[in-house]
């Protein structure tokens, strides 16, 4: 059964940026798009164990900081080698100025 | 680490030998590497992609190549063609490497298709299968100069200096590269390639190998039919007569430095070089910086260097200075095979992370 989990205040993530969010034994990447919408995905790249929170958000993609593989962080689709396996994504929402993700 | 008294045993640099397993057991594969601290806000600025610098540089690069080719063709048969081909050769046979590299990372241009187009063109020029080398370079960044893991270790110890010198005229590299392309065109992916290329990518590797082989075959046939060497001087030949600049700087990237470490300050080299070479090499002389932060485009590397240089060993002051260190290390390795050049860090730098390197690779065990 999934739960909505509080991540941070809305303003803690710049527009078109990403942060790391650890919860229990799991790690996530939480994004704000250029228009302020929020998204969440697994934190580690599916190619190597590299955290995407150190990567670059470009439009609706996240680029891995180690090998420059790209995912669409809104759908999880793998867009550019060396990533071939899609990224798991999770529902995210704004609730009274806080970002929450459902995991 | 760097125990030069340790009994020396020749290493197996292949990806299919015992060193691969040993590196994995020692924790050297897909490991955490040292990074200098850069505030996120600054790093985001440095990582930003732009089309302007690479579009300008590519226009100059291809425009000059075209002009030099026209000059060489116009004076073909006379000594006057030589200077044209000398320049054409370097633009083709050396600058292709840096364009292949930057566009392979996807950082040169902001627009993805521009990276892809130049990557394909440069891959052909440098005689590298664009698919297999994309994956080999990803592994090179994961496991930089980790023996048994990194498929792009240019100099394997004990280094035969005369053999390394042949690289300046593309030997034996182009024969190895062409043989690999022919094998891949026949549909054969080697065991080493299978170690770092997922099976889903193999058909692409075969496809691009066939394209490259077809173009080279066309150049050879045209040469024979026309009874003139000109087609091969224009296509393929520059990997022999114009590759020296790529090798001159490429050998300095990691040559004479440490193997099996997890700190790029120990196995990569930053060198101050002249502006012409920086144009040809697209700032890859900032090699420590590039390996620490591969997301930073070539045009932002000088700024990144200025930001973190106090955490890095002092750069070599010139190509000559770097070669003194590099050749000195190779000569010393003849008597002390475990020797590698180790540069002192400035007082402002974080110390080398010794605990990452106290690893007995021969036993495949991490240090305490």
Image: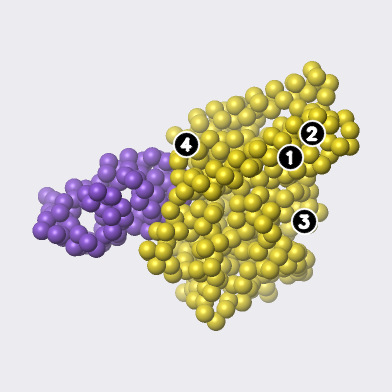
Q: Residue at 22% of width from left, 49% of height from top?
A: A37
What is the chain letter for disc 1?
B
Residue B265 place in picture, x, y as percent: 56, 67
Residue B103 seen in this snapshot: yes
Closest to the camera, between mark 3 and mark 4, is 4
Q: Give the Cα separation between the discs numbered 3 and 4.
A: 41 Å
What is the chain letter for disc 3?
B
Quickly name the residue at label 1.
B88
On the same chain: label 2 and label 3? yes
Q: Earlier in the sequence, mark 2 or mark 1?
A: 2
Give the secondary structure at mark 3: loop
Q: Nearer the viewer, residue A39 or B351?
A: A39
User: Outermost residue toward the top?
Assistant: B225
Q: Compared to A60, does B221 lie above or below?
A: above
Quickly name the residue at label 4.
B113
Q: Residue at 59% of width from left, 45% of height from top?
A: B57
Residue B363 seen in this snapshot: no
B53 lies left or right of B224: left
Q: Give the Cα separation between the discs numbered 3 and 1.
A: 30 Å
Give the chain coloured yellow. B
Q: Give the Cα separation between the discs numbered 2 and 3.
A: 36 Å
Chain A on-screen colour: purple
Give the secondary structure at mark 2: helix
Whether tag 2 and tag 1 are in contact, CB under 8 A, the answer is yes
What is the chain letter for disc 2?
B
Q: Give the Cα separation between the discs numbered 2 and 4.
A: 31 Å
């Amino acid at each position: 059964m999934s739960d909505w989990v509080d991540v941070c205040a809305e303003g803690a993530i710049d527009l078109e940026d990403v942060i790391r969010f650890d919860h229990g034994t799991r790690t996530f990447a939480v994004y704000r798009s250029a228009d302020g919408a929020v998204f969440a995905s697994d934190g580690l790249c599916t190619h190597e164990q590299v955290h995407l929170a150190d990567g670059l958000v470009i439009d609706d993609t996240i680029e891995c900081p180690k090998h420059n593989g790209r995912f669409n962080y809104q759908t999880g689709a793998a867009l550019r080698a060396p990533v071939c396996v899609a990224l798991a994504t999770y529902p995210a929402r704004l609730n009274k100025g806080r970002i929450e993700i459902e995991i | 680490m760097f125990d030069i008294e340790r009994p020396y045993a020749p290493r197996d640099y292949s990806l299919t030998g015992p060193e691969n397993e040993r590196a994995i057991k020692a924790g050297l594969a897909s490991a955490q590497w040292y990074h200098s601290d850069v505030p996120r806000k600054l790093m985001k600025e440095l990582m930003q992609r732009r089309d302007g610098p690479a579009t300008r540089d590519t226009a100059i690069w291809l425009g000059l190549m075209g002009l030099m080719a026209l000059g060489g063709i116009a004076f073909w048969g006379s000594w006057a063609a030589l200077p044209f081909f000398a320049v054409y050769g370097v633009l083709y046979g050396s600058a292709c490497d840096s364009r292949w590299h930057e566009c392979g990372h996807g950082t040169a241009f902001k627009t993805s298709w521009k990276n892809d187009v130049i990557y394909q063109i440069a891959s052909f020029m440098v005689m590298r299968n664009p698919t297999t080398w994309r994956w080999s370079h990803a592994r090179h960044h994961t496991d930089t100069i980790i023996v048994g893991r990194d498929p792009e270790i240019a100099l394997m110890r004990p280094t035969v200096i005369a053999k390394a010198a042949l690289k300046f005229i593309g030997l034996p590299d182009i024969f190895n590269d062409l043989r690999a392309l022919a094998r891949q065109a026949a549909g054969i992916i080697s065991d080493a390639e299978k170690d770092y290329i997922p099976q889903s990518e193999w058909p692409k590797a075969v496809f691009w190998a066939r394209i490259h082989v077809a173009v080279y075959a066309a150049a050879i046939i045209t040469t024979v039919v026309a009874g003139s060497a000109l087609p091969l001087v224009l296509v393929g030949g520059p990997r022999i007569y114009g590759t020296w600049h790529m090798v001159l700087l490429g050998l300095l990237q990691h040559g004479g430095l440490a193997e099996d470490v997890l700190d790029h300050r120990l196995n990569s080299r930053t060198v101050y070089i002249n502006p012409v070479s920086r144009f040809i090499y697209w700032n890859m002389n900032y090699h420590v910086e590039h390996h620490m932060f591969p997301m930073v485009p070539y045009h932002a590397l000088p700024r990144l260097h200025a930001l973190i240089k106090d955490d890095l060993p002092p750069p070599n002051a010139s190509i000559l200075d770097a070669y003194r260190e590099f050749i000195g290390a190779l000569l010393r390795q003849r008597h002390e095979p475990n020797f590698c050049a180790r540069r002192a860090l400035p007082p402002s730098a974080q110390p080398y992370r010794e605990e990452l390197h106290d690893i007995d690779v021969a036993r495949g065990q991490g240090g305490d």
